Image: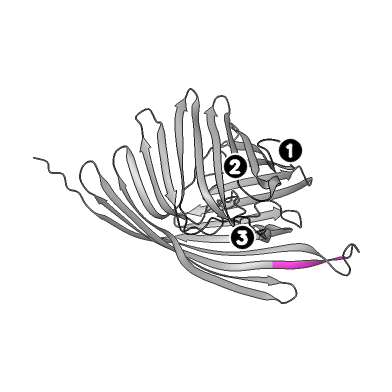
């Protein structure tokens, strides 16, 4: 007679990261508008360690309990050619969640990563994460909340979430949420011929007084509602889109409505080991009325990836800012050896970085320079 044995799994692992960045920028000297500039060397060196504990406990043949806790331990020094150095560091939780799941559902609560959508580089649905397409490790802070997902047998699925305690800006947010007020939303994803289609909704209270001078009598906390539609299809080429409409009950009329749209294509050419080429177009604007008026910004992105073998890989990304007529250029050569990974990244960007302004290290990639990173996984 065979007997089912439900075993508990306990795993400790971690990721150690070291990096250095050096870039050259032009800095204005003398009176503004004089046109006098000098070249300034700027760089950063740092280390990060992400220890992680995972626990997996089958309850019976139908249900299981999982948990994960990890920390983000880092320190870095930012330096200039003027012999000025700024050191900073922090220790904070990176993930801390528990999950109860069955064959067709899961409920996860705690500090976790929540991300979804169809776009890859220019993502209107980057609501709760800040994943940078230039980052080969795809690191992002989590959010505190509860997420439930149910999977139907036809591959349709429903997400429902509630968040609280997140007073830092998430994704594209300009105004952070009110820390002790709950946020909630849902996502419904349906299979259709050739792909999938989804709609997403989110509601929150934003803390406007942290960003704006609030007029007398105006509400410091403003209600915000987001509605999105996205889809991904696989025909001769991969096709996807994301569209988001946001309404804020704010005292600045021209910011009351905002809209964002991303359209993308990708195709793998049968040359050598296969060259994957991806392109996306992104536009964003705000106005007093939905989908009308206001000033829009427009970006395009082109990415190419070529694996030389199972160890070496080359990836390049070019962004174009149609509003300011500027290019952003990134290239990354990586080596993977069992537990070790090495990356050499080059960038050639405008002096003022208008892309991914909400991401913490975005301005570090202004100007032109190189980054070297080494990663050890255990």
Q: Is residue 253 magenta?
A: no
Residue at 65% x, 57% y is: 362
Q: Nearer the viewer, mark 3 or mark 1?
A: 3
Determine if residue 360 is in view: no
Q: Nearer the viewer, mark 2 or mark 3?
A: 3
Residue at 59% x, 48% y is: 133
The reply to whether callout 2 and callout 1 are in contact (CB within 8 Å) is no
At which x and y percent is residue 142?
47, 55
The reply to whether callout 2 and callout 3 are in contact (CB within 8 Å) is no
Above or below 102: residue 342: below
Residue of label 1: 293
Question: Can you say which quadrant of the picture contains the N terminus?
Answer: top left
As drawn, which residue projects farthest toward the right? 34
Q: Earlier in the sequence, mark 3 or mark 1?
A: 3
As drawn, which residue projects farthest toward the left? 1
Residue at 42% x, 40% y is: 159
Q: Is residue 37 magenta?
A: yes
The boundaries of the magenta stretch are 35-42
Image quarter for residue 373?
A: bottom right
3D distance between C-alphas at marks 2 and 1: 15 Å
Residue of label 2: 246
At which x and y percent is residue 86?
64, 74
Q: Earlier in the sequence, mark 2 or mark 1?
A: 2
Residue 107 relative to residue 130: left or right? left
Determine if residue 77 is in view: yes
At which x and y percent is residue 195?
49, 27
Residue at 45% x, 28% y is: 191
């Amino acid at each position: 007679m065979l007997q089912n044995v439900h075993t508990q799994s306990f795993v400790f692992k971690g990721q150690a990261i070291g990096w250095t960045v050096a870039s050259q920028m032009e800095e204005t000297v003398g009176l503004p508008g004089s046109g006098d500039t000098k070249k300034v060397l700027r760089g950063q060196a740092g280390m990060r360690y992400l220890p992680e504990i995972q626990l997996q406990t089958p309850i019976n043949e139908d249900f299981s309990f999982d948990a994960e806790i990890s920390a983000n331990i880092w320190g870095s020094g930012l330096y200039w050619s003027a012999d000025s150095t700024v050191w900073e560091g922090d220790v904070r939780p990176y993930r801390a969640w528990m999950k109860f799941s069955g064959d067709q559902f899961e409920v996860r609560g705690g500090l976790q990563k929540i991300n979804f959508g169809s776009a890859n580089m220019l993502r209107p649905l980057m609501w709760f994460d800040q994943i940078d397409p230039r980052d080969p490790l795809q690191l992002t802070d989590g959010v505190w909340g509860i997420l439930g997902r149910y999977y139907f047998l036809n591959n349709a699925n429903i997400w429902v979430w509630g968040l609280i305690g997140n007073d830092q800006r998430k994704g594209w947010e300009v105004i952070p949420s009110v820390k002790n007020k709950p946020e909630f939303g849902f996502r419904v994803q349906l299979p259709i011929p050739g792909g999938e289609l989804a709609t997403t909704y989110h509601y929150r209270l934003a803390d406007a007084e942290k960003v704006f001078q609030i007029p007398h009598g105006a509400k410091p906390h403003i209600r915000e509602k987001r509605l999105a539609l996205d889809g991904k299809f696989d025909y001769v080429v991969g096709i996807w889109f994301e569209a988001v409409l946001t309404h804020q009950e704010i005292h600045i009329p021209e910011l009351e409505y905002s809209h964002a749209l991303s359209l993308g294509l990708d195709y793998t050419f049968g040359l050598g080991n296969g060259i994957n080429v991806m392109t996306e177009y992104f536009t964003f604007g705000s106005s007093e009325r939905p989908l009308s008026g206001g000033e829009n910004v427009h970006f395009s992105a082109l990415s190419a990836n070529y694996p030389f073998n199972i160890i070496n890989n080359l990836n390049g990304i070019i962004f174009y800012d149609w509003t300011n007529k500027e290019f952003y250029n990134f290239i990354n050569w990586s080596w993977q050896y069992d537990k070790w990974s090495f990356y050499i990244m080059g960038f050639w960007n405008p002096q003022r970085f208008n892309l991914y302004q909400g991401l913490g290290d975005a301005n570090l990639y202004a100007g032109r320079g190189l980054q070297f990173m080494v990663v050890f996984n255990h």
